[in-house]
Image (spheres, helix red, strand yellow):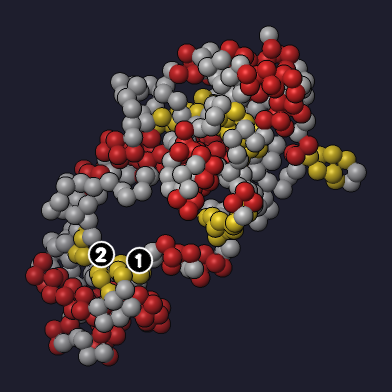
Amino acid sequence: MLWKLLASHRFLDYNKLVVEGGKLSLNSCQLLASCRVLDLTDEKGLLCGKILADLGAEVIKVEPPGGDPARRCGPYYHDMIQQETSLFWFAYNTNKKGITLNLKHPTGREIFKALVAKTDFVIESFPPGYLESLGLGYEALYKINKGVILVSISPFGQIGPYKSYKGYDLVVLATGGLMYVTGEPERPPVGFSFPQAYLLASVQASASAMIAHYHRERTGEGQHVDTSAQASFLTALTNMIPRWELSQIVTHREGSRRMGVFAQANVRSLYRCQDGFIAFFVLGGISSAKTNRAFIEWMNSEGMADEYLMSIDWSKFDFATVTQEEISRIEGYVEKFFMTHTKAEIFKGAREKHIILQPLLNIPELMHNEQLEARDFWQEVEHPELSDKITYPGPFIKLSETPLNPQRRAPFIGEHNKEIYLEELGFSLQDIMALKQEGVI
């Protein structure tokens, strides 16, 4: 078979080798420098491959001829609606290589098998059973390479009565329980303004892939990692279940107010100020007495606290007995005070007086946030094809001995076909032309 012939030739992994003392050895500067990943995902799993690429793996994004549909996800660079200008695609495909390959074509499947023979991870987000229908399910891949790890990302997982159901972001948020507790209590549930379901599922999938990788390092055996987006969200809401069972508290949406387990009143968590919002709780008990006292003293220094506020003994403030009327009265003073200041003024005063609160940062403020700048979080990535640089989020973690990959722009459609098909698999230019004409690549 074609794939066996191709797989018999050792791939030229020069990018994974460095010279040490005159000898070639594996590059140990990055965690996954010796690993290869075949990324078959659509928008549901692109972040998983990006994380592995950031960790140093050679991630090859496999697209159908003509490009992945995810390239048509907006927004676009300067509103230029083209396949090669999707900012969505840019964001989740940095540090990857890119090839085109038609898995529906018999020859395409044979080439894919040859790649699998020298691959550590395969990531996919097809409907459950689709790869099996092509003869490329986990059992088939295991026969080719017993160490391969297949990472599947789907709305509800590979088993169960929902496995064949489609699940867009809103569906996963609803079936995962998050929408039930999101929004204001007097209004219907709401979703997030930016899709989150499959981003979280991709993060869970990448972490699970590392666990499977650790197992493989010990045993030599790969395995099938089945990631359910629904289940991924429930793991993020683990505390919701015991909270409901113990107190029946989570039976409604709390929104920008919060009710503690023993509270008799709802407490605001969000206040307006002159140029945005402040996250702040009026809390009770000894642990919060210091910050509350300091806050009231700050208000009083500006003539905005009366005898009632100054008379409160915060060390004895008891949420088990306080009334909603009392809480609302205190919150009224807080709101008036915040409306006399900007976010910067409030944050500066809070730091000086050791008060627990946080201004809500918008995107421009995040781009210039001093904490993120101190961590060199934001990175400019060259886009020669656009004659421009684009700022991207940088490493999600810092590792002292194995730093993450510096950002490299997302691949063009089929950008690395020559490298993979000619230099590694040994095809000739005539072979490549024939494969293109047949719709294989």
> Residue at horizontal 51%, vertical 70%?
370
Along the viewing direction, whichever of 254 and 60 lies nearer the viewer: 60
Q: Earlier in the sequence, mark 2 or mark 1?
A: 2
> Residue at horizontal 55%, vertical 67%?
373
In the picture, which quadrant includes the N terminus?
Answer: top right
- Which amino acid, mark 1? Leu
Q: Residues within 10 Å of mark 1 (few under 14, many from 20)?
A: some
> Residue at horizontal 46%, vertical 29%?
125
Above or below: residue 417 compared with residue 345: above
Q: Quadrant of residue 147?
A: top right
- Which amino acid, mark 2? Ser
Q: Secondary structure at mark 1?
A: loop
Q: Nearer the viewer, mark 2 or mark 1?
A: 1
Residue sitting at the far right: 22
Along the viewing direction, whichever of 264 and 194 lies nearer the viewer: 194
> Residue at horizontal 13%, vertical 75%?
329
Residue with the mark numbered 2: 269
Q: Is residue 350 visible from the viewing direction of this image?
A: no
In the rendered image, residue 208, in percent from the top left (x then y), is placed at 50, 36
Tell me if 13 is positioned left or right of 68 in this view. right
Circle on res. 360 = 1
